[in-house]
Image (cartoon, rainbow, N blue to C red):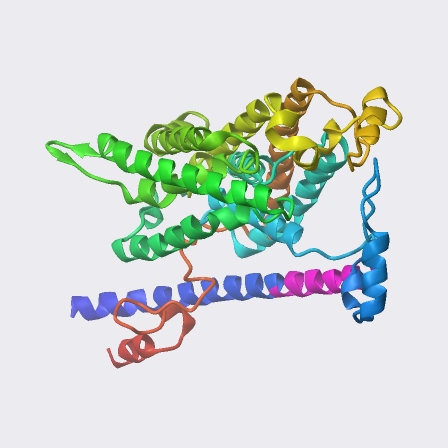
Amino acid sequence: MDDTMESSQRQPLRSSSPSHKRTRRNGTAVKFTLVTMVFQLVLIAVFSVLVDYGGHSLPPKPVAEQTEAAGSNKSVTGQKRQEPQSPNDISIYYPKFAAATVLITYGAVLGKVSRLQLLVIGILEVVFYAINELIAVEFLKYSDAGGSIIIHAFGAYFGLALSRVLHDKKALDSPKEASVYHSDLFAMIGTVFLWMYWPSFNAALVAPDYVAQHRSVINTYFSLAAACVTTFALSPLFQREGTKWRLSMVHVQNATLAGGVAVGTASNMSISPWGALLIGCCAGALSTVGYAYLTPFLTKYTKTHDTCGVHNLHGMPGILGGIAGAVAAAHADVNKYGYDGLFNLWGARAPKMNSTEYNKLVGMGVAFDAGDGRSAKAQAGYQIAGLAVALGIAVIGGIVTGFIVRWKIFDPPSREQMYDDEDYWEVPTEDGSEDVETGNGLALEKEAKL
């Protein structure tokens, strides 16, 4: 009798609570849908005005015209002549790299922000990414083929600054944050694919000649292999329990890839096989130690919670890659690369127009575009400056973005919503029925019968 009365008293509370959550969820869903559609319409308008296919949209020229164009396009002494390109010619590479940067940032705040906040973060970060890339390409003119600086370090520290601004004690020590066995297995599939295809990522923007791209692929594989071996060697040291020395899936899933991140900047440089192996060893060790000690330290003492550990996989290896690139640039000379290879890597190292060196190379019949006349040491300084500028823009951009997405209008998640997809996706319960709060599925029928 008492149980019946107690059940009847609890019933109104149980029925009203899902209704309240459902109302809040519907409002959030409508807001997200509207913002997404408006953003898509803006993209269509921007593309219609600013972007075209350049020469790719034109029909192929007759064979006779192609032969004549090829003859007139041969390099002349002191200058490289190229086919004219549309200033708005679309490229699939740069948007892809911008998207990769945003995904790295998401790793730092995953589970602690709503989908609307993620959308706003992605939009704002691309703006800061474009500013950094503009400075890198037009002013500093440093080499970063694999994106250790522009992509990995920038995305990681943007995310860390963002996470610090969005710090919430409710996100700490959540039981939902931990992984489960089958998730780790599926994550390993992603790790294997990334490991196999990372060389093509690093070599995507390398000058399309056999030497440079071959060097980039080989250096990346060497570095990845070294990081992988180092990770497996060090991981049991930090997972020791009594007499058991165990491997950590977190280390294996992430630190094994750190070599590909760290060698990115120097991947197309002449660093020798031992240099690539050394970079990979350092990156694997740095990442493993970071997951074991640095991530808990940052969470406890700086209130910077890094959900996926992007600081260990992308941040510190990215900085290591930037330093390695500067060291390689400081020792680069014509004997290692030849004039063509040297000026393809660092266009700013070509002599200035009408300088003594310029006239000398013209007299030797070398084909090149006039540059800034930088020395090896000066170019190394610009490599370090590029790293510093990227980190500065990333931190400032992350802080600004964090203060914006903290606004209530962007629906920050409650404690119950953190690390949980239930309010944003149709998630079946453990017995195979739909969520009770949706009002659908077998769970509602069972409750009605009871």
User: Considering only vertical position in the picture, is 343 above or below 360?
Assistant: below
Residue 150 placement (x, y as % from top left): 61, 38
Residue 181 placement (x, y as % from top left): 26, 54
From the viewer's perspective, is 194 left or right of 326? left
Residue 19 colored in magenta in the image: no
Task: Work out whether residue 52 can be spotted.
Answer: no
Question: What quarter of the picture does the N terminus occupy?
Answer: bottom left
Quadrant position of residue 294 = top left
From the viewer's perspective, is 74 left or right of 223? right
Question: What quarter of the picture does the C terminus occupy?
Answer: bottom left
Quadrant position of residue 391 = top right
Give the magenta-colored segment's residue range: 33-49
Q: How many marks?
A: 0
Picture residue at 42% right of the left edge, 51% below the top: 196
Task: Work out whether residue 202 can be spotted.
Answer: yes
- Give whichever of 216, 397 is nearer the camera: 216
- Give whichever of 251, 10 is nearer the camera: 251
Residue lying furthest front = 364
Q: What secondary structure characterizes most of the magenta part?
A: helix
Residue 358 placement (x, y as % from top left): 83, 26
Residue lying furthest top = 377
- Give whichever of 169, 342 is nearer the camera: 342
Residue 445 placement (x, y as % from top left): 31, 80
User: Considering only vertical position in the picture, is 218 above or below 428?
Assistant: above
From the viewer's perspective, is 362 left or right of 21? right
Picture residue at 36% right of the left edge, 53% below the top: 187
Picture residue at 61% right of the left edge, 28% below the top: 387
